[in-house]
């Protein structure tokens, strides 16, 4: 049996409904947790373009120094604060860019009690509220020189708003045309090994004598932008991802022959003879594992590039129809001033009001708070955001609503 809603705000202008609700005074909002009131809004100091949180401690009767959260709320756009538990508040605000940022704050209650001269709140996680991100990430593997990079570049060029590349870390030297942070994050082995120890990597492997790895951050950055993540990783990495909690589609790319693979590697002209020989030796084992390991959902032969690309698009459901493109394009969420927020257990429903004629954006947005995984600052992204058609769709699974 489901619980009653924690609160439902019928009239946002009327103040704190059920002791937990929202207060809209222009672009200001507040939440009360126990003896503390958290007021969130534009900074009093007009010269700073910031949103601030101020905490009022009822017991000491003191206001705590404001903490800066990020850029100012957008004029005319909504801002809400939802208490999640004793020390966490979810702040929902329209970002300063075209996206809606959802800020999830962990409040340092210790500070409020001790009146320390430090920040009273800390942003522990954030997520951009973008719809259309439910498609599984795509893992692409295959021997060096088979054409993975070429195929991925074609896909990203044709569907720029749909796919985002997971930028790996590597200890290998950069090639002429490669840019740090775009093709790879080029790094030192000792730095990367420490980061691996710190749990920052989803997977890593020694490939052709260098260390390569996918950071959790690399995948989250793409997810936060509302795009479908593409990973270009070797077979060992694909095996690790298969064993991880990341659900993905695994595609292995094969060359038409080893001779053609060698031709492509040589004509690319990015490796020394020694490196080419190493890559060709490794290619044999990779081909065997790729075809027989059971890791991969699909095998594609890259003989004719155009045909292989068409095959890839077909696997990804991109058959060229407008409907397919529409289905996976991310949509930002509008957040008007007069939206309503409802929280039931782990779900928060934002009702953004009546749809503007001709606008595709859905107006009932669900934030699934249970998908937040907690942890260190900057590591806790992953709020699951989706649109529904009706209130009951949002809370399907709860047996009873009061
Ligand atoms: N496991 C793993 N492999 C990666 C990662 N990034 C790249 N690779 C693989 O490392 C191998 C070498 O990549 P690279 O040095 O760019 O050479 P190329 O494949 O010949 O273009 C390829 O098989 C890539 O798929 C990663 O983050 N993790
Ligand atoms: N189907 C194909 N036919 C001929 N050359 C190809 C084909 N696919 C890719 N290439 C070329 O082969 C070389 C290696 O491709 P690349 O995408 O760098 O491989 P990978 O990323 O798998 O190492 C590049 O010069 C690319 O232009």
Image: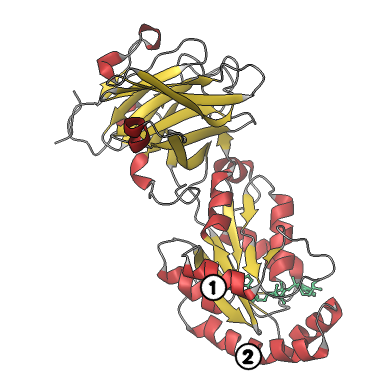
Tell me the number on the disc at residue 284.
2
First reached walking from the N terminus: tag 1 or tag 2: 1
Distance between the Cα atoms at labels 1 and 2?
21 Å
Taking the image as drawn, is residue 351 in sight?
A: no
What residue do we see at 58% from left, 51% from top?
Answer: 222
**How far across and how far down the image is residue 110, in percent?**
33, 37
What residue do we see at 72% from left, 72% from top?
Answer: 147
Whether residue 114 is situated above or below residue 374 in the rendered picture:
above
Image quadrant, ligand 1? bottom right
Q: Is residue 126 left or right of residue 141?
A: left
Q: Nearer the viewer, mark 1 or mark 2?
A: 1
Q: Is residue 229 left or right of residue 272?
A: left
**How far across and how far down the image is residue 65, in percent?**
47, 25
Whether residue 94 is situated above or below residue 242 in the rendered picture:
above
Dot 1 lies on which element?
strand
Which quadrant of the figure contains the N terminus? top left
CA neighbours of label 2 inside 10 A, class few (<14), some (14 to 19), many (20+): few
Task: Indicate how the structure is coloured in the image.
Answer: secondary structure
Q: Quick one: 161 or 379, which is closer to the camera?
A: 379
What residue do we see at 80% from left, 80% from top?
Answer: 264
Q: Which residue is mark 1?
A: 204
Q: Is residue 373 left or right of residue 143?
A: left
State yes or no: Cβ of the residue under disc 1 lies below 8 Å from any atom of ligand 1: yes
Q: Is residue 282 left or right of residue 267?
A: left
Q: How many marks?
A: 2
Which quadrant of the figure contains the C terminus? top left
Tell me the number on the disc at residue 382.
none
**How far across and how far down the image is residue 270, in percent?**
82, 77
């Amino acid at each position: 049996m489901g619980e009653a809603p924690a609160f439902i705000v019928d009239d946002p202008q009327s103040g704190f409904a059920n002791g937990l609700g929202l207060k809209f005074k222009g672009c200001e909002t507040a939440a009360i947790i126990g003896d503390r009131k958290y007021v969130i809004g534009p900074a009093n100091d007009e010269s700073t373009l910031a949103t601030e949180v101020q905490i009022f401690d009822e017991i000491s009767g003191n206001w705590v120094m404001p903490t800066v959260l990020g850029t100012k709320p957008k004029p005319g756009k909504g801002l809400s604060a939802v208490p999640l538990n004793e020390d966490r508040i979810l702040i929902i605000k329209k970002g300063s860019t075209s996206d809606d940022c959802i800020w999830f704050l962990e409040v340092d209650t210790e500070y409020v009690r001790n009146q320390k001269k430090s920040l009273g709140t800390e942003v522990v996680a954030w997520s951009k509220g973008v719809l259309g991100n439910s498609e599984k990430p795509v893992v692409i593997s295959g021997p060096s020189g088979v054409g993975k990079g070429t195929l991925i570049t074609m896909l990203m060029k044709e569907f720029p708003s749909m796919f985002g590349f997971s930028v790996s870390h590597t200890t290998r030297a950069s090639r002429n045309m490669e840019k740090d942070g775009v093709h790879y994050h080029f790094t030192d082995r000792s730095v990367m090994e420490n980061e691996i120890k710190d749990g920052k990597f989803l997977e890593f492997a020694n490939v052709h004598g260098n260390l390569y790895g996918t950071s959790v951050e690399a995948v989250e950055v793409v997810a936060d932008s509302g795009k479908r993540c593409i990973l270009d990783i070797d077979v060992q990495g694909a095996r690790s991802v298969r064993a991880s909690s990341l659900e993905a589609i695994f595609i292995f790319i094969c060359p038409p022959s080893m001779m053609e693979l060698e031709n492509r590697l040589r004509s690319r002209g990015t490796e020394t003879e020694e490196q080419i020989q190493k890559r060709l030796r490794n290619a044999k084992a990779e081909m065997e594992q790729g075809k027989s390991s059971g890791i991969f959902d699909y095998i594609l032969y890259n003989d004719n590039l155009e045909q292989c690309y068409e095959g890839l698009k077909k696997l990804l459901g991109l058959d060229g129809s407008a409907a397919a493109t529409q289905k996976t394009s991310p949509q930002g969420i509008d957040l008007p001033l007069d939206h309503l927020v409802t929280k039931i257990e782990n779900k928060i429903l934002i009702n953004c009001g009546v749809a503007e004629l001709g606008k595709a954006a859905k107006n009932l947005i669900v934030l699934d708070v249970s998908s937040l995984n907690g942890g260190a600052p900057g590591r806790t992204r992953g709020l699951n955001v989706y649109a529904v058609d009706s209130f009951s769709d949002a809370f399907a699974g709860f047996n009873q609503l009061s």
